[in-house]
Amino acid sequence: MLNPSEVKALGQFRDYLMTPRQMLCFSGPSLETNRKALESLADKDFLARERPNGAYSLTSLGYSAMKACR
């Protein structure tokens, strides 16, 4: 079960039409606003942490969850 902030963070991946293994970089206010949700999603294996800091990519599980959150 995803909380509203996690759903909102996944929505940003949907806004950019991201697919599994594509990286999205968050920075500045966007990173600060979404950091807790992004880290929580990474801990749940919906996202993979990438480099540089603030970069995440969708896993297959995260992609499925993103599609279901419409």
Image (cartoon, helix red, strand yellow):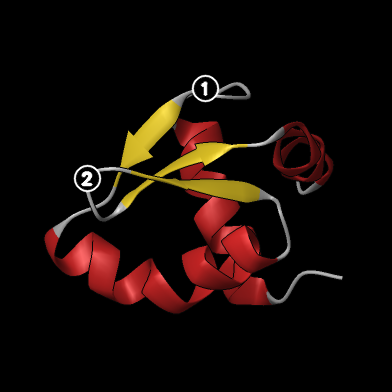
Q: Which mark is residue 41?
A: none
Distance between the Cα atoms at labels 2 and 1? Answer: 21 Å
Q: Residue at x 84, y 42 (%)?
A: 68
Q: Quadrant of the N terminus?
A: bottom right
From this view, report whether residue 60 is shown above or below residue 17: below
Q: Which residue is drawn at the image coordinates 41% and 30% (left, top)? A: 23
Label 2 vs 1, first from the N-terminus: 1
Percent x, y of residue 15: 47, 34
Question: Could you tell me residue 6's position as x and y percent?
Answer: 61, 66
Q: Image quadrant of residue 59?
A: top right
Q: Which residue is mark 1?
A: 17
Query: What residue appears at the point 55 percent right and 61 percent down from the top-left corner?
Result: 8
User: Mark 2 sits on what residue?
Assistant: 52
Q: Nearer the viewer, mark 2 or mark 1?
A: 2
Please identify the quadrant where the C terminus is shown: top right
Element carrying mark 1 = loop
The residue lying furthest to the left in this view is 28
Could you tell me which residue is drawn at 60 percent across and 72 percent down? 40
Task: Reply above or below: 48 against 18.
Answer: below
